[in-house]
Amino acid sequence: MEKFQTFTGLAAPMQLVNIDTDMIIPKQFLKTIKRTGLGVNLFHEMRYDQDGTEIPEFVLNRKAWRNAEIIVAGDNFGCGSSREHAPWAIKDFGIRCVISTSFADIFYNNCFKNGILPVMLQREEVDALMKHAESGDNARFTVDLETQRITGPDGDVYEFEVDPFKKRCLLEGLDDIDLTLQKEPQIAGFEAKHRLAMPWL
């Protein structure tokens, strides 16, 4: 998994509340088990009309935000059905951080397992960042996971909380498989003892 430490990226505003996982990646795109290739389908029903033409009004189709790496969103981002394809699509598009006042629990945890930092801030802080994001290609935020700070384009700093274990995993680029492989010597030792104790298995 890609490490998440400090980066400066363009922020896109998404004022909608209750953006659910079906809006993030509709059910017809859940057939794949690959983590790549889903970015083109991110927010599919909002980005494209029925013949596949881009809807120009949608924020990620507009010139100022086509290369956004941060989303500033309304309340309760990632609600709805559990689908890991949602963070896959977000990451594949190029989004590395989502800022909101609240997230659905399963989506929130899935973000950390896929190299995305979900940041919860107070309403007034999200509102301030949303205004910056709406300004277009000047809306670049610096996200520093080590110090747990977001710096806006005006220099204002917003501090956020994050679970220490989740923070370590993102900083070191560790997903569940990587964490398991860190125990490889202990696993190998157990298997060797198991084979000696039960050679018939």
Image (tube, rainbow, N blue to C red):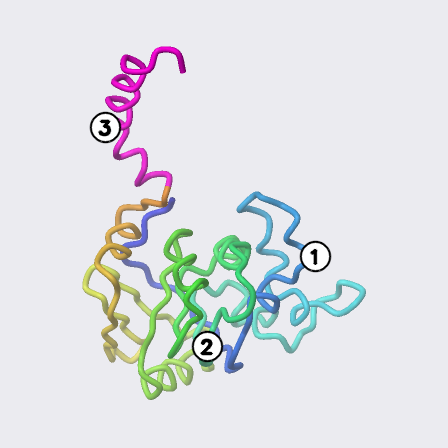
Where is residue 76? Give x, y as percent. Answer: 46, 77
| Segment tinted magenta in the rendering | 177-201
Where is residue 10? Give x, y as percent. Answer: 42, 68
Label 2 Cα neighbours within 10 Å, binned few <14 / some 14-19 / many ≥20:
some
For image coordinates 35% across by 86% down, the residue present is 123
Identify the image quadrant of residue 28. Answer: bottom right
Magenta-drawn stretch contains 144: no
The dot on residue 76 is: 2
The secondary structure type at the circle numbered 3 is helix
Q: Nearer the viewer, residue 47 or 45?
A: 45
Residue bearing the label numbered 1 = 28
Upstream in the sequence, badge 3 or badge 1?
A: 1
Q: Nearer the viewer, residue 135 or 49?
A: 49
Question: Are the two marked residues, 1 and 2, in contact with CB atoms closer than 8 angstroms?
Answer: no
Answer with left or right where residue 69 lies relative to residue 63.
left
Q: Which secondary structure class fits the magenta region best?
A: helix
